[in-house]
C-alpha cells in the first residue's frame, strides 16, 4: 500500500486533547482519539507511510511499538492507548479469521463456562499478584513516544474479568445460586488490578486510564443494574478516585445500551469520558446532546459503516457528527468502537482526513 499523497503535517499537543477531555476545549477544533487500532491495520498503514519500516527497536515487540507510535503520530493523534500486561487465564475458542487483513485465527472467550465455576476451582485458580504485571511495553512507549504526545494507559475491565472467569452463562446463574462466590471473585479482581492501576497512573506521560469494560448489549445492560451497583461500580469508583487524586482522567469504554446506568457512571463513579457508540443504539450526536455538558465524548463513527461503506459515505457521516458534536468543545473524533482488521484502510483514512479538513477549514490549521 502506498500513501504518497497523505497531506497532513502532524504537530501533536496533548494539552489540546486534555482540554477537550475535561470539557474546556475549543469548539473550532476536534482532536482525534482512538481506543484501539488492530495491528494488521497498523502494519498496512506503516507499509505505506514508512516504506521499509525504518524503526530500530531492539526486539520485535519494540519495533511493533515504534511502528504503532509513529503511525499514530503521522496520522495526527495527540495520544494513544498503551497497556501493562497482567492477563488472567480464560477458556478460549479459536476460529479462522476471514477479515480483510487476516491474522489467521481469532480467539473468543467461552461464554458458557470458564475456569471458575465453584469454590474449589476458585481456590485452585492461579491468581496473579500485582507485582507480576509486565509494564515494559508501557515504559518503552513512555520513553520513546514522539514529542507532544501522551499515553492513556489501559485499565482492565472489572465486569469483563468476572464474566470471562466464570463464563457469562455461569456468571448469570451464580448471581442467584452462588452470590458469595461472585463477591469473592470481584474481591480478588480488585486485589489484582487496583494496585496496578494506582501505580501506572503515576507514570510519566500517562494522562489517564482508559478502561475497557463492556457492560451492555443492544437493548440494555448484560446484568441487572443492581448487580453492577453492588459488585462493579465500587471498584470502578476506586479506580476513578486513584486517577483524580493524581490529577489524571478516567475514561470509560463500554459497549451496549447503558442508558439505565449512565447517570450513575457520571455522578457516582465519576467517569470523565464515554466511548463506544453504535448508531442502532444511540447515535453519538444524541449522546452529546444529552450528556455532553457533563462528560466528554469520544468517537461514534459506527464500525459497521467503517467496514462496509464507501469513503465518501464515511465523509458525509463524519461531517454530520462534527456539525453537532464539535460545538461542545468536549468531543474527540474516532470510531464507534475500534479500527478492526476488517475495516478497509482507505475508510479509516477518510474518517481521519475529514477531521483534518474540519480543523483546517474552521481554525486555519495548516496542512
Image: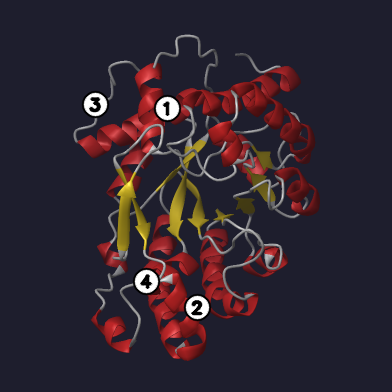
Vertically, is 103 above or below 133? above
Secondary structure of the residue carrying tag 1 is helix
Secondary structure of the residue carrying tag 3 is loop
Sequence order check, earlier mark of 4 and 3: 3
**What residue is shown with label 1?**
71
With 351 as the anchor, is 213 left or right in this view?
Answer: left
**What residue is shown with label 4?**
165
- The residue most toward the top is 5
With 55 as the anchor, is 73 left or right in this view?
Answer: right
Sequence order check, earlier mark of 2 and 1: 1
Q: What is the distance, in whole Å, between disc 4 and disc 1 at their CAs?
A: 34 Å
Query: Viewer-nearest of labels 4 and 1?
Result: 4
Vertically, is 311 above or below 238? above
Q: Is residue 334 visible?
A: no
Q: What is the distance, in whole Å, between disc 2 and disc 1 at their CAs?
A: 41 Å
- Which residue is at a point 66% across and 18% down the rendered structure image? 365
Q: Is residue 281 visible?
A: yes
Vertically, is 195 above or below 277? below
Sequence order check, earlier mark of 3 and 1: 3
Q: Quadrant of the N terminus?
A: top left
- Which residue is at a point 45% across and 58% down the rendered structure image? 155
CB atoms at circles 4 and 1 under 8 Å apart?
A: no
User: In the figure, residue 113 lies in which quadrant?
Assistant: bottom left
CB atoms at circles 3 and 1 under 8 Å apart?
A: no
Q: Which mark is residue 172?
A: 2
Query: Viewer-nearest of labels 4 and 3?
Result: 4
Q: Which mark is residue 56?
A: 3
Sequence order check, earlier mark of 2 and 3: 3
Sequence order check, earlier mark of 4 and 1: 1
Amino acid at each position: 500500500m502506498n500513501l504518497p499523497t497523505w497531506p497532513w503535517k502532524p504537530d501533536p499537543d496533548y494539552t489540546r486533547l486534555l482540554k477537550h477531555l475535561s470539557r474546556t476545549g475549543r469548539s473550532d477544533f476536534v482532536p482525534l482519539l482512538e481506543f484501539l487500532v488492530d495491528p494488521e491495520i497498523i502494519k498496512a498503514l506503516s507499509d505505506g507511510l514508512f516504506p521499509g519500516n525504518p524503526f530500530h527497536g531492539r526486539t520485535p515487540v519494540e519495533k511493533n511499538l515504534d511502528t504503532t507510535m509513529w503511525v499514530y503520530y503521522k496520522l495526527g493523534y495527540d495520544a494513544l492507548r498503551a497497556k501493562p500486561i497482567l492477563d488472567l487465564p480464560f477458556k478460549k475458542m479459536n476460529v479462522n479469521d476471514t477479515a480483510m487483513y487476516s491474522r489467521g485465527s481469532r480467539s473468543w472467550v467461552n461464554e458458557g463456562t470458564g475456569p471458575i465455576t465453584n469454590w474449589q476451582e476458585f481456590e485452585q485458580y492461579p491468581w496473579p499478584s500485582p507485582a507480576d504485571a509486565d509494564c515494559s511495553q508501557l515504559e518503552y512507549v513512555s520513553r520513546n513516544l514522539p514529542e507532544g504526545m501522551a499515553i492513556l494507559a489501559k485499565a482492565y475491565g472489572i465486569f469483563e474479568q468476572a464474566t470471562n472467569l466464570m463464563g457469562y452463562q455461569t456468571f448469570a446463574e451464580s448471581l442467584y445460586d452462588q452470590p458469595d462466590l461472585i463477591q469473592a471473585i470481584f474481591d480478588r479482581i480488585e486485589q489484582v488490578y487496583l494496585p496496578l492501576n494506582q501505580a501506572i497512573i503515576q507514570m510519566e506521560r500517562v494522562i489517564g486510564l482508559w478502561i475497557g469494560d463492556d457492560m451492555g448489549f443492544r437493548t440494555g445492560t448484560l446484568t441487572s443494574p443492581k448487580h453492577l451497583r453492588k459488585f462493579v461500580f465500587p471498584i470502578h469508583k476506586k479506580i476513578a478516585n486513584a486517577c483524580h487524586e493524581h490529577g489524571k482522567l478516567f475514561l470509560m469504554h463500554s459497549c451496549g445500551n447503558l442508558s439505565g446506568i449512565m447517570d450513575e457512571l457520571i455522578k457516582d463513579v465519576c467517569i470523565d469520558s464515554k466511548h463506544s457508540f453504535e448508531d442502532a443504539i444511540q447515535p453519538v450526536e444524541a449522546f452529546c446532546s444529552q450528556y455532553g455538558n457533563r462528560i466528554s465524548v469520544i468517537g461514534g463513527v459506527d464500525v459497521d459503516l467503517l467496514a462496509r461503506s464507501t469513503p465518501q459515505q464515511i465523509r458525509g457521516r463524519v461531517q454530520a457528527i462534527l456539525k453537532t458534536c464539535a460545538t461542545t468543545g468536549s468531543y474527540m473524533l474516532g470510531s464507534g468502537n475500534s479500527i478492526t482488521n476488517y475495516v478497509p484502510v482507505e475508510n479509516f483514512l477518510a474518517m481521519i482526513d475529514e477531521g483534518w479538513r474540519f480543523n483546517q477549514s474552521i481554525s486555519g490549521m495548516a496542512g
